[in-house]
Amino acid sequence: MAEFTGEILFIGGGNMGGALIRGIISNGLAQANQITVVDPVQEKLDEFQAELSVKTSLDAASVLNAADIIVLAVKPHILPLVLDEVRSEVRPDQLYISIIAGVDSNFIQGRLGQENSVIRVMPNIAATVGASASALAGIATNEQFDFVQKMFESVGEVVRVEEHLIDSVTGLSGSGSAYVFTVIEAMADGGLLMGLPRPVALKLAAQTVFGAAKMMLESGEHPALLRDRVTTPGGTTIAGLHKLEKGKLRNSLIDAVEAATKRAYKLKKKARKGK
Ligand SMILES: NC(=O)c1ccc[n+]([C@@H]2O[C@H](COP(=O)([O-])OP(=O)(O)OC[C@H]3O[C@@H](n4cnc5c(N)ncnc54)[C@H](OP(=O)(O)O)[C@@H]3O)[C@@H](O)[C@H]2O)c1
């Protein structure tokens, strides 16, 4: 892929915007002087300037026209205000990337009023430690998708999906970090019950989850195969697994993904009606 020599504008310099800017710069996808951050809080902009030497602005409309790629990283309720604010400055050749939950790419395209390419990304909070699970969808060229994939690979793993599946991604990986935090906490509580000090139990539980995920991702093997390999007849692990089956852990997690997916769909419908 040719080196990117254009300008990237981030509208919203919060958790996700900040993580992505750090990832892009540290992976050499763009230089700091090709990046501008817009945020309403001057102190935050000063921090970006001091830490990363990026350009900053309090006003999206005044810097939008110069950008080739615009990353929309504000909260969902702010998005319509931002799009209305910048609309008169939009160039049709600009690529828009939205990480905003519950907003379709064709809504953004319609609101921009031009035939811009729009790529929608659903990352998760682990982007802040370079370990996001992100999914891409939208209306764009293959070259644009390739570039955006590289951008999000700078903060973790990336898959591409059809846009109608983005709500399912929200239900699985978008919301999933919170499920896993709950699993880790519960495992650690089990350790506590069995006499382990809390910090020891939490560290062991978190590292166990991390290690199992790493093994699966690196080997490419199905989790059931990996589980069978560590489950000996009459051993300790099968005793624990038996309890998990009785407690319907698997069923609960499947239900959780289904409930969050349905909720994402509902919120999207509600937001659209409100516009
Ligand atoms: N966090 C996640 O796990 C996650 C996962 C997937 C998708 N997302 C999506 O990512 C988006 C950003 O999430 P986040 O966690 O990064 O939120 P965040 O930390 O609140 O960041 C949003 C930033 O936008 C700023 N902002 C508010 N109004 C603005 C405006 N008019 N122009 C420019 N910037 C403005 C906010 O400033 P103030 O704080 O001063 O208002 C804040 O710095 C959300 O839409 C969310 O749906 C988040």
Image (cartoon, rainbow, N blue to C red):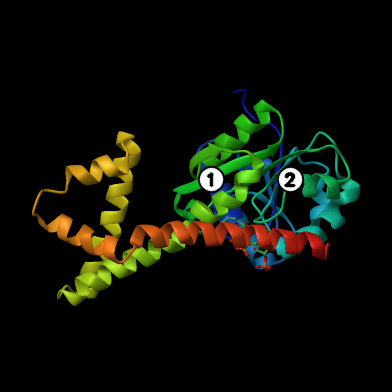
The residue at the point 79 percent across, 49 percent down is 107
Identify the image quadrant of residue 273. bottom right
Q: Check disc 2: other Cα within 10 Å, few if <14, some if 14-19, many if 20+.
A: many
Residue 215 in the image, given as x and y percentages of width and height:
28, 42
Give the structural element (helix, strand or loop) at label 2: helix
Q: Nearer the viewer, residue 54 or 162?
A: 162
Q: Quadrant of the C terminus?
A: bottom right
- Quadrant observed for ligand 1 in the rendered image: bottom right
Residue 71 in the image, given as x and y percentages of width and height:
69, 47
Q: Check disc 1: other Cα within 10 Å, few if <14, some if 14-19, many if 20+.
A: many
Q: Which residue is mark 2?
A: 105
Q: Which residue is mark 1?
A: 134
Amino acid type, mark 1: Ser
Amino acid type, mark 2: Ser
Is the residue marked 2 within 8 Å of ligand 1, measured from its CB? no
Task: Give the residue at the far right of this rendering.
Answer: 88
Left or right of 273 in this view: 244: left
Q: Is residue 20 visible?
A: yes
